[in-house]
Amino acid sequence: MSRARTLAVVASLSLGSVLVASLFREPSPKRLGALAHLSKTSATASIGAGKEAIAALPAPPLATASSASEAASPSATNDPLSVYLAQSVYPPTSRPLRAEQDDLIHPDRRYDPLRQAASEPRVTFLLTADRLFVTGDEETTVTLEVWRGEAPAAVQITRAEAFVEGAQGEPDAPPSRLDFAEDGLGYACRFSPARLIHGDDAAFVSVRVSFTGDGSLSETSRIRFQVTPPSAVPARFSGQFRDRIEDGSLVVEAGIDVEKAGRYAIDANLWGKDDRPVAWARFKGALTVQDAWVPLVFFGKAIRDAEPSLPLRLGELRGARLAEGKDPDLEAMAPYAPPYEVTLASLTELSEEPWESPKKRAMIRMLSAAEASPGAPRLSSISLR
Amino acid sequence: MTTLLRARASRLASVLLFGLVGLGCSAEASFDDLADEDAAVRGEALGDDGVEPMQGGETFLIQLEGLCSTHFLQGKTEGRLAHFDGVTPVDAYVDQRESMAVATSQLKAILDAYCLGDNACYVYTYSNGGAVISRTLSLYDTDWNILYVLNTASNEGGSELGGTGWLGEKLGSCTLSGHVGPADHRPGWNHNDTGGTSIYQIGGYDGWWYSSILLPKKHDGAVSFHSAAGLSKPMAASSLCQSKSLYWDGHEVAWSCEGYPLDHMGMKMKGLCELGGCE
């Protein structure tokens, strides 16, 4: 550890547990209010698109596990075969969707951590954005919020720039200047990262922000995006849908215009009439330029177990092509936002049977054999509620 | 870059092998009815005559290191290959110095080499190796025969130290150490798609004193419980055991809710020893 960083750390520790606690508390109403205010405002960037409404920003990332959610002293344990049998009631690519699954319900959400200023230990800041993957000419909103203790702090942004990463993550070309606008209790900038990319491959684009403030406050922080420029976008959702029942499961087919053949992963969620989460499904396989539809198979039992109100609707449709041998190795499709209402008329059209497949039978055989082998690794898991 | 990946994949030839006793998975057992009763399934799996219904394959234990490493025996903390009767340990050569794309591609090549056909694999990962196996299982649809994955001190959910420089200074400095935070790993791939493989987690709580400034609640100095446990969003957790609905699909906690009184480096071999593979 460098001497400077060590000194900063020692200095920060002198503030004791109060500071530590403040870093990891629940988001205060004041902070949430600041974010809400920011989300309604506008900003400009020198390479951006001007004064458009800024999309809603993610809430501060950290929650605290409630005592109720912490499964106190679970007593039962399970062996790997029992665990596998329980997990494989549903197939790997279609399972129930739970309200707690923020990562599936808000797949764009970043979790940039709150940082402590090394130069001024009482200061914390959050440099974040509204997404990790940026596709085509999409714009992204970058925000900076700074607090001194509990109070929002004004700072001077001395330098803000965006650049395509080259070797070791350093700029591949001279960075482009970004203009952050002061707004409410923070600072924001909206820009289109793809405009920095001159090649035809997806790339990492970084935003680096330096700011100063009262006292000795002087910080530089950085966040990164995975950007698929327009010329690299591998496929587009056409906006057409159709659905059917097949082998007791609901198959929703999304229309797709494939420009690059290859291996794709395409995800979507299913919601009930009352906006309750029902199930998620994933297509994982090869697509060719001749393919006009991609099937999303929502497993019958996963839907039946949720007991949803009809009609069902499709949401959060997104996907990417795996560009093997490249870095980044994902070429993202633009997410498709409008919901599609499924034609399913009755849940009884769906099967309640557990998942069954040759692969599942093979796994049961393998795990049974491993369990019977005296020299095999011995694993037991906690039975959680 | 393609050439680079191919060159690195060729290092697989140097993977270490010890002992060759098979477990296998190729026989034609009959399962007309996948009964809900575990006992019935187990009895049928072993056959009425008690003879193991699989012949011919081998069982491997893939040992995957963490951040800034190239293989399990080379990491900043001493590593050893485990010893189990009938299981061949494999020191996985996966380059985690540069990018997750390179690491994912190389791990796929290893799984292709050892975990297909009649072979079966256990996978043991340490630290950022937990993120690499998760990403590999999520992006590829290959029919690997993976019995289960055990992650120790997993960085699958990202470390709040990522990008601060502290991780690199403690675990070894490399380009990738700046890109293993929650904002890199959590939205980076669908962690709920494990390809049907069960992923088990253990974690430590003897955190380095300065890491407590950045890492929420209990941690091992490099990763917090929310990452080590496989929770689907970052939270300040004092136990590895949370409500089941808070985990990524396919993720389980092994042995202990409290975790182990070890720091991140001390956790490297803990899972292997708990499995009974330390001598």
Image (cartoon, rainbow, N blue to C red):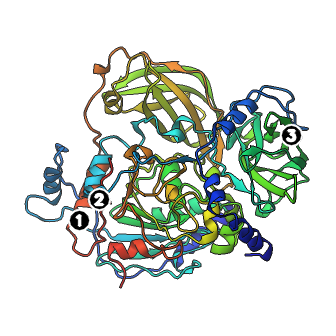
Amino acid bearing label 1: Glu
SS at mark 3?
Answer: loop
Look at 20% across and 67% down and name the residue there: A372
Q: Amino acid at mark 2?
A: Pro
Residue A74 x, y percent position in the rendering = 30, 55
Relative image position of residue B52 (x, y in whole percent): 18, 65
Which comes sooner in the sequence, label 2 or label 1? 2
Going 62% across and 39% down the picture, which residue do you hit? A108
- Where residue B171 appears, as percent x and y from the top left, is 63, 73
Q: Position of residue B139 (x, y in %)?
A: 53, 49
Instruction: Assess whether mark 1 and mark 2 are in contact (beta carbons under 8 angstroms).
Output: yes
Residue B172: in sight, yes or no? Answer: no
Task: Look at the image and tell me whether residue B121 can be seen.
Answer: yes
Few, some or many C-alpha atoms within 10 Å of disc 1 (few <14, some 14-19, many ≥20)?
Answer: some
**Is A12 on the left-hand or right-hand side of B212?**
right
Which numbered disc covers residue A371? 1
Crowd class of label 3 (few under 14; some 14 to 19; many from 20; radius 10 Å)? many
Residue at image position (22%, 70%) is A373
Which is nearer the eye, A213 or A372?
A213
Q: Which residue is mark 3?
A: A180
The nearer-to-camera label among 1 and 3 is 3
N-terminal label among 1 and 3: 3
Determine crowd level at label 2: few under 14, some 14-19, many 20+ residues with C-alpha closer than 10 A: many
The amino acid beneath tag 3 is Phe
Tally of numbered discs: 3
Residue at image point 29% right, 59% down: A80
